[in-house]
Image (tube, rainbow, N blue to C red):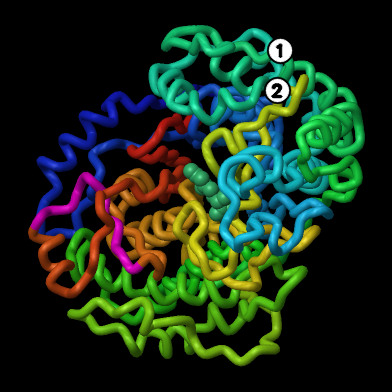
Amino acid sequence: MRSILYKKGISVFLFLSLFVAFVPVGTNARAALREPARGRHAMVASQQELASKIGVDIIKKGGNAVDAAIATGIALAVVYPEAGNLGGGGFMLIRKANGEVHAIDYREMAPKAAGRDLYIDKNGNLIKGEGSSTVGYHASGVPGTLAGFDLAFKKYGSGRITWRDLIEPARQYAINGYVLSNRVANLLRSYDKSLSKYEESKRIFLNGGHFYEEGDTFRQPDLARTLERIERNGAAEFYAGETARMIAADMKAHGGLITLDDLKNYQAKERTALKGNYRGYEVITMPPPSSGGIVMLETLNMLEGYDIRKMQSNSAAKYHVVAEALRRSFADRAEFMGDPDFTTVPVAKLIDKKYAEERRQSIDLKKASSSVKVGHGDIPSGESMDTTNFTVVDQQGTVVVNTYTLNDLYGSQVTVKGTGVLLNDEMDDFAARPGKPNMFGLIQGEKNSVQPGKRPLSSMTPTIVLRKDGSLWFALGARGGPRIISAVIESVINVIDHDMDIQAAIDAPRIHHQWLPDELLYEPVGFSPDTLNILSEYGHKFTERPGYVAQATGIMIDGKGVRLGAIDARGDGEAVGY
Ligand code: DON
């Protein structure tokens, strides 16, 4: 088959400069000047080119999108260690070619020894440093990644690819190494202070304190041995085998919480995907324990009441209503959301169009609301957990959107002795002290307090959008904590309301609002002072400094069936198609 692999030639810097200079004012600007990658048959868009290529190779070998996603995910644990992982967790959303949808929750789980006040000292203050929810041996939830991949492989893989096929390419990169980019070498160095507190992390990721330079070959022999055992023994190796024993032993040696029993008890779970629609287009997304899908559908439902297309893509009017809708949905996030196995989440009500209509009533088109006054919506307790389902229609092409994480870059900063596996600090996604902000500034409630066996509330938002005939249109997800939700929402409206292709939709400037703190975050590029002045006149308070709103990767199917792959201008990666 003819390869039509396209590479994006314009550097991010050049793109951003051009962007500032040429975005037309007063039109529905097709904001980005970059072409998406194109592939007639398949596309993998990930934040590391080597991992994308591994995914595409699996498809060329006869695998399906699920097989490719798993191989890409395993590879990212080696070639993108800041976030790719075996020691973290996440969510995989699958829509098969026959229209079946599957949502796999492989979010981390609080260890049995964890409790509500784990991260609070005797004076009632949040513990900092070792013992906290953000760094060190107490910060990790029981990892879910391999359990999730195992479930996906066994139930939804093609059956034509072996488990070994999925692991081996990653193992090769772990043994033979890969060349570090300038960005990654600098990033590792910038984590000197935190990584060097943990001997194994210092040895592996900081070259024993001598650091890596751009162009060095980075080898991870311990991780290669772990992958070899996983290749041989399956995912059970991580949960009940030698690797599990190594994790439990390292935890015990450092006063950590995760035991062999915790690992043995971990289970990935299948959830019912959320389905809503925006202006008649079906939107399929992730249910709790991610808040992402609910917050997105609630926000889109509110925005449906406005003529966003007429407001135009980069107007103050549009940013204002997006911010106001986000303010309200994030207030509901704080009050109503948590692990559905531990608490009742009023999903159906929150994503109901009528509820959005009520929430929309308090939005003033010329005036920012006060977050304190907005508060959460009025929902009686005892609401059912059911989700509204729409009819699933036939289409061509299986799609998988997978978002997984260690939370912070390099997670808890702890690498388990002898395994090369970095662990997550996902425990910080719980409300370590309900009512007080976590590392993302998110205020969260009792529903998301720490309990043994519970999964922390996430913002990950893997999302699939269908055309009105029910065929796959586009799919995307993002990294960036709560900003993920804003990034996915704004990309969706950029496609639907502003006619952008997937690359333009993802690259266009965006804002973020999360209710509290009561501030609007805008990006350093793409916002004119005039727009900001208008937003300020409406009463919006800005964050002290502008900052980027997440990093997304997505794929769109064009009218001829060509797969268009897009990597965010804000981050690394490569979409590889064939
Ligand atoms: O689950 C969540 O919402 C967060 N742990 C995601 C963290 C994240 O995206 C960090 N990304 N850069």
Q: Is residue 111 magenta?
A: no
Residue 120 picture location, percent across and down: 64, 58
Q: Is residue 372 left or right of residue 17?
A: right
Give the percent coordinates (x, y) of residue 374: 38, 82
Q: Can residue 298 be spotted in the picture?
A: yes
Q: State which quarter of the image contains the N terminus.
A: top right
* Discs 2, 1 touching: Cβ within 8 Å: yes
User: Seen in the image, is 12 located left or right of residue 430?
Assistant: left
375 relative to 155, above or below: below
Asked whether 548 or 576 is in front, the reply is 548
- The amino acid on which the numbered mark 2 sits, given as a three-letter code, is Gly
Q: Count the marks.
A: 2
What's the residue type where badge 1 is placed?
Pro
Q: Residue at x 61, y 68 (%)?
A: 274
Please tell me whether mark 2 sits on a helix, a strand or a loop: loop
Question: Which label's residue is closer to the chain start, 2 or 1?
Answer: 1
Q: CA distance from mark 2 to mark 1?
A: 8 Å
Question: Against 91, is 18 above or below?
Answer: above
Residues in magenta?
518-529
The residue at which mark 2 appears reads as: 420
